[in-house]
Amino acid sequence: MISKQTESRSSIALFAYSQPGFACLSELIKIGANVSVVFTHIDADDEEIWFDSVYDLAKKNNIPVYRSKKIDESARKFFYQAAPDIILSAYYRAMIPDEFLSVPRLGAYNLHGSLLPRYRGRACINWAVLKGETRTGVTLHVMTEKADRGDIVAQKAFDIKMTDTAHDVFLKTSLAVKKIIKEYLPLIEAAKAPRFRQDESQATKFGRRHPADGIIDWNDSAAAVYNLIRSVTHPFPGAFTFYRQQKLFIWWAVPLTEDFSDQLAVSLPKNLQNYSAGTIVRSKEHVIVKCGQDSLLLHTIAWAGEADNIPTDKTFIDVFKTGNRFDWKN
């Protein structure tokens, strides 16, 4: 049952998906916002669905919800019937039609998982981890015809730890989304939300990532390979290499560098620098791979389609022998 206080507030059409989208809807419900309609996605069959369901949360709270792969004709009718005062978007994957943006009298706003204007575009969280960033955040900005270009309303920053995976950063992003919604929705409703132009000289943009982008180039430094691994490890598609045309996922590993000084106690062969990139060095307790710079200590691996395992398991005894070498392609 919607309260009279909620009904008196400005109506919101929410476009949301993934964990940040779920966090956004959760906070809107918690603070008694008037969410008149929710648009979300049909889950893809080929994707690991690790995040909470926006669709289920809307249903549970008796909020009209439309689920599709993109904005189709039925979604358009649903939207125009709602005639919202505000549009909010949080990790909705399809492009919201430009004509929608002029409908709400109080504006259309997007929650983007970076500190704009840096990391515009898709997969911004995964890219930030891949690039070794130590700080990121969430930006609430005005939606325009050009994605991620509108004026900034608010930003919440947080640190990315050296051990954080992209999943960890998604959870931090979700918390930041809640904080922004709680603080700035009342300002949007009162037409008093601040606006600041983005500094185009600081803009960076990255594109969509695909599972095939997870291939490891062992000529890269151990730190760069590590960043790739943690940017796409579970629940994402994963970083991988090949051994004799078999695809092997490296789900976790750490670089043997000063940043991981606790790992430096691992006994390294004196002639490690003589090995070429991608070469395996095996001891009784550890499996190390030589990179273009420094080396990587393997922790969790799996053949494609098989369960995670440790590299010292007997099933890998023929693979992880000193001198064996990973391939760059199958």
Image: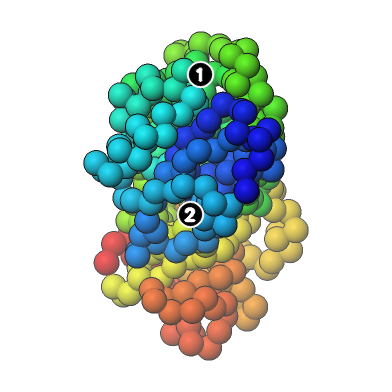
Question: Image point 39% across, 58% down: which residue?
Answer: 43
Three-letter code for the amino acid on which mark 2 is drawn: Tyr
**Relative depth, front residue between 300 and 83:** 83
* Percent position of residue 103, x then y: 39, 22
**Mark 2 → mark 1, Cα distance in angstroms:** 25 Å
Helix, strand or loop at mark 1: loop
Q: Which mark is residue 70?
A: none
Q: Please report whichever mark, 2 or 1, sits nearer to the chain's N-terminal start.
A: 2
Q: Residue furthest bottom?
A: 314
Three-letter code for the amino acid on which mark 1 is drawn: Leu
Q: Is residue 44 left or right of residue 139?
A: left
**Relative depth, front residue between 271 and 278:** 278
Of the 4 image quadrants, the one containing the C terminus is bottom left
Q: Is residue 80 left or right of residue 315?
A: left
Question: Image point 29% across, 73% down: which residue?
Answer: 245
* Percent position of residue 290, x then y: 50, 60
Q: Is residue 254 left or right of residue 198?
A: right
Helix, strand or loop at mark 2: helix
* Percent position of residue 141, x then y: 51, 23
> How many numbered badges does the structure rendering display?
2
**Relative depth, front residue between 272 and 256:** 256
Q: Which mark is residue 55?
A: 2
Crowding near the residue tagged with mark 2, few <14, some 14–19, many ≥20 C-alpha atoms within 10 Å: many
Instruction: In the rendered view, tell whether residue 262 sits above or below residue 285.
Output: above
* Percent position of residue 63, x then y: 52, 47
Instruction: In the rendered view, tell whether residue 106 sits above or below residue 309.
Output: above
**For residue 284, which quarter of the picture?**
bottom right
Q: Is residue 135 in view?
A: no
What residue did someone put label 1 on?
Answer: 106
User: What sort of colour scheme is used for the picture?
Assistant: rainbow
Crowding near the residue tagged with mark 1, few <14, some 14–19, many ≥20 C-alpha atoms within 10 Å: many
